[in-house]
Image: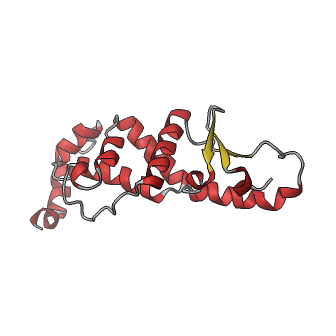
Amino acid sequence: MDVEEAGTVTLVSKEGDTFSVPTPVAEMSELVKSMMDDDEPDDDDDDNQGSGTEIPLPNVKATVLAKVIEFCEHHRTEPMTEIEKPLKSQNMVDVVQKWYADFVNVEQVLLFELILAANYMDIKPLLDLTCATVASMIKGKTPEEIRQTFNITNDFSPEEEAQVREENKWCEEA
């Protein structure tokens, strides 16, 4: 069955939940696009007829996949402005449009799951947005503040920390 003819693709989450997505939206993912391209020579097979194309995404939870699809659908109608590097602000509203800033205003766990999904599914705009959000959370903070933000335990002894600070003094001077 020709994917373009069908107009939709079924994405299957880790849990087996299915999401029917317009083909152009699904093709924002380079992974999905290449899997769809791999399926095309099999058009002669009768086992897929009438069912559309199913793309399994075993590394993506249903809740995360729903957010990824929401991003892709919005991005098709209102593309995200390019993210300037280095970031000009810690506030994502100053970096991208309000909708995108609100989209990544989520709990850390979901944000990191979105990064993993964007990387796995190869969706560059989503990966750029989520990584920029993490960068904005780090920007302008001391190592101790960063540890608190991301709940990281300091495994350096005071002597090791002093040595690292001395070796990297040039970083703080810039």
Work out whether residue 157 can be spotted.
Answer: no
Q: Position of residue 62 (x, y in %)?
A: 56, 34
Total numbered circles: 0
Residue that lies at the very extreme toward the left in this rendered image: 173
Work out whether residue 36 can be spotted.
Answer: yes
Q: Position of residue 24 (x, y in %)?
A: 58, 55
In the image, residue 106 above or below residue 166:
above
Relative horizontal placement of residue 140, taking residue 53 as reference (left or right): left
Which residue is at a point 31% across and 49% down the rendered structure image? Answer: 133
Which residue is at a point 59% across and 51% down the rendered structure image? Answer: 26
Q: Position of residue 130 (x, y in %)?
A: 37, 50
Relative horizontal placement of residue 120, taking residue 91 as reference (left or right): right
In the image, residue 95 above or below residue 101:
below
Image quadrant containing the C terminus: bottom left
Which residue is at a point 61% across and 36% down the rendered structure image? Answer: 14
Q: Front-most of 33 and 121?
A: 33
**Display colour scheme:** secondary structure
Relative horizontal placement of residue 3, taking residue 19 as reference (left or right): right
Which residue is at a point 20% across and 57% down the rendered structure image? Answer: 164
Q: Front-most of 121 and 70?
A: 70
Q: Position of residue 63 (x, y in %)?
A: 51, 33
